[in-house]
Amino acid sequence: MTASALAGELHLPLFSVQLHGLISKFMGETSAKLHTLFESMNVTRGVYFFDEFDAIGADRGVGNDVGEVRRVLNSFLQFLEQDNSDSLILAATNFVGMLDNALFRRFDDVVRYTLPSAQEAEMLIRNRLHAFLPSRVGWKKVQSAAKGLSHAEIARACDDAAKQCVIEDCEKVSSAQLADFLSERQAARSHED
């Protein structure tokens, strides 16, 4: 969501780098694809977003990695350092502790997202569901159901509630329905952990 917001504010196209298309089993091919990608940043100004960045940015000091992964990260670091484009490069991960320390020196800023407070969750829900919210919402129940969820999980629950409203041809989402969708996200989260 941050990459999309930045691209919108900067009036630049957003390019989401698909790592599964970038990473190859053949030695040297991933670095060659990275090189091509960085060259394209000079030609096409935009916001380039690497999601799940730990796939190529893992700590090189960890003993169980593959030599090719180290080479790919070394290439990425060199390309990043040599980048003179007017493009914005973003990377995201849920596993910050896995990242190589050299990455933190190459990126200008590191933004850490904490879980939203009850008030932030309410603001997010109001923004996400503004067309579907009734005039009266049981915010304590909704905030309680949202507690411990990330911004993305709350947004996904809101999207699910809006979809359900459209499918059932109803105009508004009830507080109970919204709390149920948030609770489903809670259950999915605890199942993943």
Image (tube, rainbow, N blue to C red):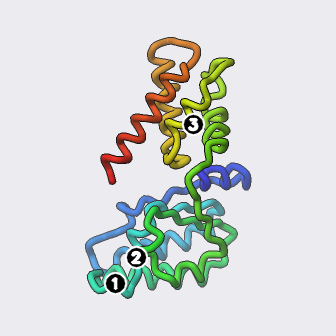
Up the image or down, 58 lies above or below 140; here it is below
Q: Which residue is rendered at x = 64% and y = 37% of the image?
A: 122
Nearer the observer: mark 3 or 1; the answer is: 3
Residue matched to label 2 = 58
Q: Is residue 93 left or right of residue 88?
A: left
Nearer the observer: mark 3 or 2; the answer is: 3
Question: Amino acid type of disc 3?
Answer: Gln
3D distance between C-alphas at marks 3 and 2: 35 Å
Q: Which mark is residue 143?
A: 3
| Quadrant in the rendering for residue 129 | top right
Q: Quadrant of the C terminus?
A: bottom left
- Rendering coords of residue 14 (x, y %): 59, 54
- Rendering coords of residue 56 (x, y %): 40, 73
Q: Which residue is rendered at x = 65% and y = 44% of the image?
A: 120
Q: Residues within 10 Å of mark 1 (few under 14, many from 20)?
A: few
Q: Are marks 3 and 2 in contact (CB under 8 Å)?
A: no
- Rendering coords of residue 7 (x, y %): 66, 54
Up the image or down, 78 lies above or below 23; here it is below
| Quadrant in the rendering for residue 18 | bottom left
Question: Amino acid type of disc 2?
Answer: Ala
Element on which disc 3 rests: helix
Q: Which mark is residue 102?
A: none
Going from N to C along the chain, the mark reached first, 3 or 1, is 1
Going from N to C along the chain, the mark reached first, 3 or 2, is 2
Q: Which residue is rendered at x = 66% and y = 27% of the image?
A: 130
Closer to the camera in the image, 90 or 163: 163
- Rendering coords of residue 10 (x, y %): 73, 55
Q: Are marks 1 and 2 in contact (CB under 8 Å)?
A: yes
Residue matched to label 1 = 62
Question: Amino acid type of disc 1?
Answer: Val
